[in-house]
Image: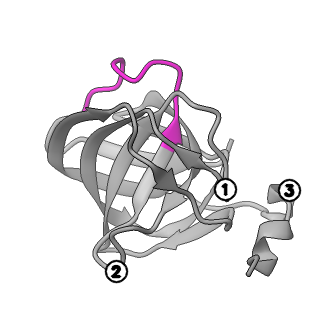
Amino acid sequence: MTDPAARIDTSVYGDRRPIVAEVVAILHVTFPDRGLKLIEAKSRALRVGEIHELMLTDEDSKPGGGADHVRVVCFFEVQQGGLAVVGDKVTINGEPVGVIAGWDMTHMPNHMNFLVKCDDLEKVHASLGDRLSVNMP
């Protein structure tokens, strides 16, 4: 069944505060065929204390679609919650990472796979304690 929220255009979302998180674990793996299945929803609420996995893709991924070429970067813990929307900018220590492509819920309720579209999977680096933020475009 199609999620009714999938029909909503991202232009309906007004001003939102940034989401702020801290990198709590580093991962070193790239998949040529990960098989992520993105949910149809274009937004997700992130609550303080939640831990999620940051994944990167250079594919043209979008809600309801998928991604195979994926690099797993880190896990992050939300310090300031908020609403994340597809197309929002993601940074680590103020350096651009890319834009939100969508979310894969394979490991829920443990964590979401938070997929970010970027141009170069190897360009992004994270260290323990780094500040990850999600901001409106």
User: Which residue is label 1 attached to?
Assistant: 63
Q: Earlier in the sequence, mark 3 or mark 1?
A: 3
User: Which residue is label 2 attached to?
Assistant: 109
Q: Which mark is residue 28?
A: none
Q: Examine the image and state in which quarter residue 106 appears.
A: bottom left
Q: Earlier in the sequence, mark 3 or mark 2?
A: 3
Residue 122 in picture, x, y percent from top left: 33, 19
Please tell me whether mark 3 sits on a helix, a strand or a loop: helix
Above or below, 28 against 131 in this view is: above
- Name the kind of residue labelled 2 in the image: Pro
- Whether residues under marks 3 and 2 lie with C-beta atoms below 8 angstroms apart, the answer is no
**Numbered marks: total:** 3
Does the stretch in magenta take in 13? no
Separation (CA) of disc 2 from disc 1: 19 Å
Separation (CA) of disc 3 from disc 2: 29 Å
User: Which residue is label 3 attached to?
Assistant: 11
Instruction: Tell me the mark number nearer the camera, choosing from 3 and 1.
Output: 1
Considering the whole magenta stretch, tell me its main secondary structure: loop
Q: Which residues are magenta?
A: 116-126
Please tell me whether mark 2 sits on a helix, a strand or a loop: loop
| Image quadrant in which the N terminus is located | bottom right
Residue 137 in picture, x, y percent from top left: 69, 41
Residue located 58% across and 60% down the image: 17
